Amino acid sequence: MKKILLRRMAAVLFSFAVPHSLFACFAYTAFSATASGNCSVNVAWTFQECQEPGTYYIEASADNGSTWYIVNSVATGAPTDTRSYTYTDNYAHPPGSGSATVEYRVVFTSIYVVNPAYSSITSVSLGASSCSNACSGVPSNLSITGPVDLCNGHNASFGLSSTYPVIFNVTSGAGFVSLSQTVGGSTASVTNNNTDGQYMTLEVNVYGCKTVTDVVALGVPPNMSYSISPSQDPFCTGSINSATLNPIDPAVYTADIGFEWGYVDQTQLTGPFVVNSNGGITQDYTPYITAPDVYQLYARALNSCGYFQGNTVTLDIQASDQCGGGGLSTARQGLTGKSSLFGPDNDHLTVFPNPTSGLVTIQLPDSFNIERTFIRVMDVMGRPLQIKAAGSYTPALNLSKWGKGIYFVEIYDDKRSFIRKVVVSL
């Protein structure tokens, strides 16, 4: 008797020490799926559950197992013996789908076991059928809820506007994110694995009746190619003007992207004048310039995650007292290292001292067209802070007005462009 008691105590201690998923009885002993009449299939299985309560989820796939969706669930208590369940599926063959082969499996989840148990997979040929009433209870206006932008390194929860047991899938952009979901849950957690400028597509299928998708921007907007065209040139001071972004690739512009429009001029002391912090591709504005001047219009893409460095385009404008006459109207890509054209006189262009307490001098090569040479100061995110005409071959700048930090100074004429990084340490 003492030996029997010791064996029982050892068995109890072993049950606490070993995860439940390691027990041999936690398994399917039988599974079958067979067509049964109009648009239906009988799914039956036998499962030995080790006295664990949980839920069976019947899953189907119409694309050879690439995407699974939950068609029903069956709750179970804590049976001590092998049990059999039968389920008749009326959702696996949506209206108008024609002849279809659907694959079935069953998933058991337990409150004690982290990893669910999957049955084998069986294919069922359902034939052609209308299934006119199978999906009548599924709302037509379902949508995925969650943020439209998932910032670099962040995670967020996504769900459905109505609660159903579903499986979330990332159908595009899966390599940029990690998705976590409990089988049978109505929400999923997605983590952006340190990605900017990409998109992911989330997809769920409700009972095989309706597929719901949502495109989510990962991080800041992608690096887009644009130029800016004005409605008139030169612009008249004090009048309403319009400018338009011309996307080289319109496909990259999505609804979650806005544009900060602004301009800078030669007398700017505190940074750019922002016309609209979340505008569209076209922007109307009135330049508040009291005298004829050269200034620079700019636009840069943004979303809730911020700005993409280098995702800014600019246009040099000649502001005038009166309409007519000449002016600068060339749309320019810029604000990235790629915009620099390294010519033979590159070594002769210097910005000093660097680092600086604020004051710097620029030494221009003799080959520059000084009457068409301009200097632009940018912050680390590529936003213009000031534009000024060079005026001489040794123009000076005072960067202290914007505080301690890193700035980019671009010097350009009508033939070339050079960028220098300047560190201001006050």
Image (cartoon, grey):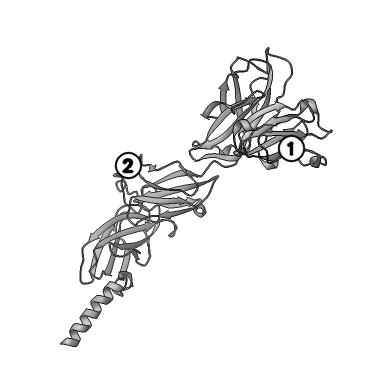
Q: Quadrant of the N terminus?
A: bottom left
For residue 19, the mark is: none
Picture quadrant where residue 138 is located: top left
Q: How many marks?
A: 2
Residue 313 lies, in percent from the top left, at 63, 33
Q: Secondary structure at mark 1?
A: strand
For residue 139, the mark is: 2
Q: Left or right: 195 with respect to 414?
A: left
Picture quadrant where residue 17 is located: bottom left
Could you tell me the amino acid type at mark 2? Pro
Q: Residue at x 32, y 55 (%)?
A: 184
Could you tell me the amino acid type at mark 1? Val
For residue 351, the mark is: 1
Q: Residue at x 17, y 87 (%)?
A: 2
Q: Residue at x 38, y 51 (%)?
A: 188
Q: Left or right: 117 with respect to 287?
A: left
Q: Quadrant of the C terminus?
A: top right
Q: Secondary structure at mark 2?
A: loop
Residue 225 lies, in percent from the top left, at 63, 38
Residue 319 lies, in percent from the top left, at 67, 18
Can residue 126 be seen in the rendering of this structure?
A: no
Q: Residue furthest right?
A: 366
